[in-house]
Image: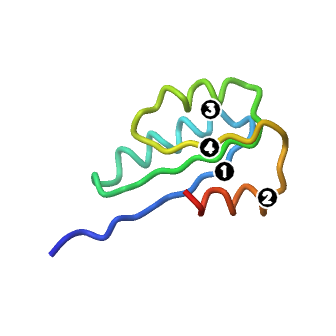
Amino acid sequence: MSKVKLSVIISTCNRLELLQQTLESLRKNSDSQLEIVVVDDASDDGTWEYLYQQKDIKILRFENKATIAEVKKQGFSL
């Protein structure tokens, strides 16, 4: 019996420290079947640069501020 793969979609905007804590917690408390997707809504606090270095997550970036509906839609489309 195979494990069900779980996808976690996180939207963020200028919350680098909280995002780092969240990702660390997800990594520590989950198995390898977890898929992490982060949608960055035009952060300018170093969030994108941090995300770009993370090789175990899928990332998407909005260059300009988007509505929450647009962010969620893009996150689900990955």
Against 4, is 7 above or below?
A: above
Q: Residues within 10 Å of mark 3 (few under 14, many from 20)?
A: few
Could you tell me residue 60's position as x and y percent?
62, 43
Nearer-N-terminus badge (4/1): 1
Query: Please, what secondary structure does the residue beneath circle 2 have?
Result: helix
Query: Please, what secondary structure does the residue beneath circle 1 have?
Result: strand
CB atoms of marks 3 and 4 within 8 Å: no
Scheme of colours in the image: rainbow
Could you tell me residue 13's position as x and y percent?
74, 41
CB atoms of marks 2 and 1 within 8 Å: yes
Reading the image, the residue beneath label 1 is 11
Nearer-N-terminus badge (3/4): 3
Query: Which numbered disc, 4 or 1, marks the residue closer to the eye?
Result: 4
Question: In screen coordinates, is 56 left or right of 66?
Answer: left
Inter-mark Cα distance, 2 to 3: 21 Å
Reading the image, the residue beneath label 2 is 68
Numbered mark located on residue 60 in the image: 4
Query: Please, what secondary structure does the residue beneath circle 3 have?
Result: helix
Against 77, is 13 above or below?
A: above
Question: In screen coordinates, is 31 left or right of 35?
Answer: left
Tell me the kind of residue under disc 4: Leu
The residue located at (74%, 42%) in the rendering is 62
Tell me the kind of residue under disc 3: Glu
The residue located at (75%, 43%) in the rendering is 41
Residue lying furthest left: 1
Nearer-N-terminus badge (1/3): 1
Nearer-N-terminus badge (4/2): 4
Inter-mark Cα distance, 2 to 1: 9 Å
